[in-house]
Image (tube, rainbow, N blue to C red):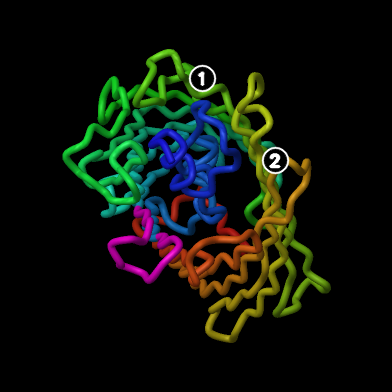
Amino acid sequence: MALKTRICSLALFCLVNGLSAQDFHFVNSFQSPSLFNPAATGSGSAKRTQVTSLYRGQWDNIGHQKAYQGIGIFADMRFCMQNSRKSYYAFGIGVQRDFSFLGGLSHSAGMLTAAYHQHLGGDRFLSAGVNVGGIGFGVHPGNLKFDAQYQNGNFDPSRSNGEDFLRESFVEGDIGAGVQCYSNEAGWSLGASCQHLNKPAYSLFDNQNRLGIGMVVFGTYTLQPAPYADYQWQFRGLYRRQSFLGSNSLQWQALLGSFFQLKTDQNIRWSTGLYARTTSTSTQSLHLNALIPAVQLSGETYSLLLSYDVDLARTRTRFSGGVELLFSASFGQADRCIVCARF
């Protein structure tokens, strides 16, 4: 198998077998909306400052050198507008790295985000945001095995790997923008964003192979049976398309989930639910890819979520899914413009 194809097969949740440029980490945590929409910067926390950390382990034992893993940390801060009771603006910063010790395969991203949130009256807000940063990708060919290095079934590392690398790593600038309408108190949101507006190059072989302008649409809706009930349901949905045009426009994924939340007397909320992930494949326009059970513990200023992908597609490892752990904490002042989230 040539390295071009090998990279695509190793890439986290790659959705096609082609060699066109595409996001290496095509699936992001639904619990960190600023990852895919900068307009979400600053929304959803009880205090002025929020910090979120994320770990994701793929395909094998957690921490094993063959396991593909991802880590990330994100922080944002809100500032109330002086001439408005509720409107505010927010700034954020985030760093994410996905890596595999085997082959030195890695994808990195860093971003600065900014968003303005306009109070629409009641508990409703409309926000718009942008993110500016960079993405990078790298591989160490000396740690990998190539078809060209085999002779009569025996591997010979001294043989040429047959690959014509233009480079073994790169860093490119990246720009995105988004909008969102939401109500933290009522527990609903609807947003959309465009990613890779500058179409950064994303290939080890050809600078002309570029990421297309992608799209993300997401929403949440909370249903509480009675005004003072201590339980409620929340429904979550996300649709992501790799590119508006070109061959990558056939690459998309959707997440649909339902969560049941129970609130205790100590203002602690326990939530449990299930996501279903669907994707496109080369032979199917709609394919149920995975079921993702998750459990979440939330307090006034923190949230801890644990989920596990139960992949329904065939994989070569007996550990067919991936575990994701996310912790979020908010601290600082509770300014007048902050409306606490219900979920």
Say which of 68 and 163 sits in front.
163
Mark 1 or mark 2, which is nearer the start of the sequence? Answer: 2
Q: Residues within 10 Å of mark 1 (few under 14, many from 20)?
A: some
Q: Is residue 68 left or right of residue 314?
A: left
Label 1 secondary element: loop
Question: Which residue is pictured at 63% across the width and 79% down the height?
Answer: 263
| Callout 1 amino acid | Leu
Which residue extends farthest top? 208
10 falls in the magenta region: no
Which residue extends farthest front? 152
Question: Which residue is pictured at 36% across the width and 22% down the height?
Answer: 205
Q: In the drawing, what numbered circle is on residue 197? A: 1
Label 2 secondary element: strand
Read off the residue under disc 2: 121
Q: Is residue 278 above or below residue 126?
A: below
Residue 58 x, y percent position in the rendering: 44, 60
Q: Residues within 10 Å of mark 2 (few under 14, many from 20)?
A: few
**Which quadrant holds the N terminus?**
top left
| Callout 2 amino acid | Gly
Say which of 4 and 67 sits in front.
4
Question: Which residue is pictured at 42% across the width and 60% down the height?
Answer: 56
**Which quadrant holds the C terminus?**
bottom right
Residue 123 x, y percent position in the rendering: 67, 48
Q: Are marks 2 and 1 in contact (CB under 8 Å)?
A: no
User: What's the CA distance linking mark 2 and mark 1?
Assistant: 32 Å
Residue 216 x, y percent position in the rendering: 63, 36
Q: Is residue 186 above or below residue 61?
A: above
Residue range of the region highlighted in magenta in the rendering: 56-71
How many numbered circles are shown?
A: 2
Q: In the drawing, what numbered circle is on residue 12? A: none
